Amino acid sequence: MTFNPLEQRGIPLERQVRTWRELDVQPIDPDHCDPYTRCRVITMNGIEVEAVLFSHQMARHCPDPEVKRQLARTRYIEAQQQKAVNWLLPGVSSVLETTIAYEQVAVDLTAWVARMEPDPYLKQAYQFGVLEDFDHLYRYANLYEMIEHRKADSIVDQLTEVMPGRPTKFHHRDPVDNVRDPYDRTRTDPLSKLHALTIMSAEQQTMNFYMNTGPTYMEPIARQLYQEIGLIEEEHVTHYESLVDPGETWWEQLVNHEYNECYLYYSFMEQEPDPRVKSLWELHLNMELEHLRTACDLMRTHDGRDPESVLAPRLPNVLTFEPNKGYLRELLDTQIDLTTLGAGYVREAHERFEAMQERINGGEQPPSERVMAQHRQMFGREYRSQTEGEHPDPAQREQS
């Protein structure tokens, strides 16, 4: 790939404000769209939410009123982009159907990043996290069949398997064991920075989605499951955000955000089969090119450094949504019994882990286990993907 966003000019900022008619996008059809189109929509919504939140935080720490004004101009466009992207999701889908799509994003996005990550320590962080999202998908799929009497495979289209991962009850760790070591901003591959920012943003949006939609359910088991997994998503955000070098300046973080948006919009434009959605990715890419140019000018002026010194000279190979079944099964076979200790990983249930389990569970089964018991009571079985075959049940290898 030879596309270098630093050499491209996008749509001038003053021409980027859209009217209500332009923002009123037609939603995708949940029954006929490519499931990965929906995954790309959910991903870019998370990316745009992070862009807006980061810009607000930067503005709150910035004493220069002119910089605040420049951030506000770009941020308003980012907010419009977020609305256009998120409003592609169809209103006919239930919250639980959208939840299953969120978990498909978490599984296949994180698995792809883990496969492509050049840094072994960062790769391990993604491998660890994806087995937990994999189990969240499984728990929600069972809840979906219980409440709506439909199968999750109708949403994920068998592109992503629905089967147990690392059991959700083992995801509750002492908070200090969720903090990882950061990459070194002076030596890490620019691709690693993009990976960390992408997965952090996606998990942050999942955390936000669950803590806002969880209490909208009437069924007690649904409310309880969203509460449990919502807390784990907070752990995941801690896990991934700690990978980012805190020594990066605000200006460096700003250009990384804008560059990452260019990377993802370009990636999704290249693979999107829906012409209408593809045109939105292309439009937003051309907007982001100008946001990146503006951010680079700010970095040169206020940080005294050339953005080329911290960014990739050209976009990496496109980030791709694709099945990761074989890769995930390999991780299930080799890493299901891992937990965290300090900034590393161990196979033993150590003292802090066991103490946290006792504190949060209080000697009772957590909602993630109760939902399975209720499903078995209703149907005499657990819900599994039809493509699972005879693969061994990871739940049989749970930590003791």
Image (spheres, rainbow, N blue to C red):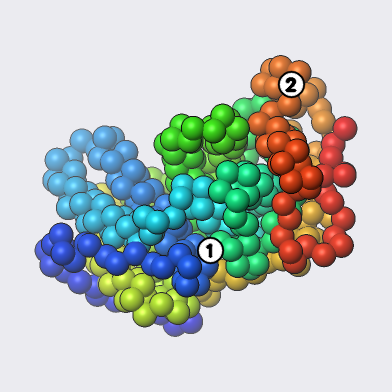
Disc marking residue 364: 2
Relative depth, front residue between 384 and 1: 384
The correct choice, above or below, for 334 with respect to 62 in the image is below
The three-letter amino acid code for the residue at tag 1 is Leu
Amino acid at dot 2? Glu
Residue depicted at 42% across the width and 62% down the height: 41
Question: Is the residue 344 above or below the residue 255 in the image?
Answer: above
Image coordinates for residue 274, horizontal then vertical, percent = 41, 77
Left or right of 271? Residue 143 is right
Rendered residue at 76%/41% (across/down): 376
Sequence-first tag of 1 and 2: 1
Which of labels 1 and 2 is toward the front?
Answer: 2
Please identify the quarter of the rendering in which residue 257 is found: bottom left
Q: Circle 1 is placed at which residue position?
A: 191
Q: Position of residue 159 (x, y in %)?
A: 63, 68
> Is residue 200 something that shows in the picture?
no
